[in-house]
Image (cartoon, rainbow, N blue to C red):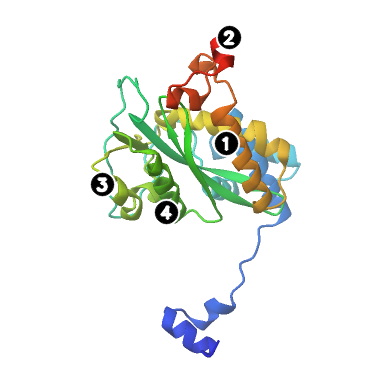
Amino acid sequence: PQLTIERQCELLGLARSSYYYEACPESRETLDLLRRLDQLYLHFPYYGSRRFAVVLSEEFQQPINRKRVQRLMQLLGIEALYPKPHLSRPAPGHRIYPYLLRDLEIVRPNQVWSADITYVPLHRGFLYLVAVMDWFSRYVLSWELSNTLDSRFCRTALEAALCWGQPEIFNTDQGAQFTSQDFLEPLQQRSIRISMDGRGRALDNAFIERLWRSVKYELIYPGDFASGQDLWLALDRYFHHYNWKRPHQALRYLTPAAKYHRAPTKYAQAM
């Protein structure tokens, strides 16, 4: 309290204008477009900005040009699912690791983990959700929310997941959050093999993409959350239900927790 604002900014290496700056929130129209674009992408992940521009223009009954759709898709962190260059670009200088999961048989827990980020709409804004999943069991080991697409909340989720143990292979896409040294450091320190999806191949991380589809259809869009606090509490309940109580068809109606901990549930045994 004894320090002046000017001195505080000087110590932090910030311009004084940064102290007074207030970010402008997205308009209601833009938030509605983001929400609808995310819903459309769940149905048509192979659509590009041109097709989305046509669909959105018809639905909102006003011209929405391709450049605006491209900006919205960049905010959402989505791309059309077909091979092309410059997809999920890493930051300059970040190392890209090869994809290690092709033709690999996943036969045990903690053999392969993966992480991914998705957009989550709110009434007056949006947040980003990251999750770490065990591929064999579909068990969600950890998750975090953030209002920015940086590596810090991804690192937090990774460190929380590593409290369960560690995988032999950890797979992500080539996004800058996952190729940053800050994120990769805990994996390298534990000699965990690092795998990254090929460019334009979102299906390389298909299991966690299916998780996002379930989260959004079963919680996000029906819930229509007003605040990040409400969303956090709802996600906490949802992931507990998803892991421990929701039978998974691909697991022969075991829950992910039963598969991960190798303890069949009564429901699964009855099936």
**From this viewpoint, is residue 217 visible?**
yes
Q: What's the CA distance linking mark 3 and mark 4?
A: 16 Å
Tell me which label, 2 or 1, sits earlier in the chain: 1
Q: Quadrant of residue 253?
A: top right
* Disc 1, SS: helix
Q: Earlier in the sequence, mark 4 or mark 1?
A: 4
Which residue is denoted by mark 1 in the rendering? 239
The mark that comes first in sequence, 3 or 1, is: 3
As helix, strand or loop, the secondary structure at mark 2 comes to helix
On the image, numbered disc 4 is attached to which residue? Answer: 151
> Of callouts 3 and 4, which one flags the residue occurring earlier in the amino acid sequence?
4
Residue 79 position in % (x across, y down): 49, 39
> Is 218 situated left or right of 189 in this image?
right
What kind of residue is marked 1? Phe
- What kind of residue is marked 3? Gln
Q: On residue 270, which mark appears?
A: 2
Task: Work out how far the residue at label 4 is from the one at label 1, CA to CA, in angstroms.
Answer: 22 Å
Marks 2 and 1: which is nearer the front?
A: 2
Q: Nearer the viewer, residue 138 or 210?
A: 138
Q: Amino acid at mark 4?
A: Ser
Question: CB under 8 Å between callouts 3 and 4?
Answer: no
Measured along the vertical axis of the image, is residue 93 above or below residue 18?
above
Check disc 4: other Cα within 10 Å, few if <14, some if 14-19, many if 20+: some
The reply to whether residue 45 is visible in this rendering is no
- Amino acid at the residue labelled 2: Ala
The residue positioned farthest toward the left in the image shown: 191
In this view, the residue in front, 209 or 90, is 209
Residue name at image x 42 percent, y 42 percent: 161
In front of the other: label 2 or label 3? 2
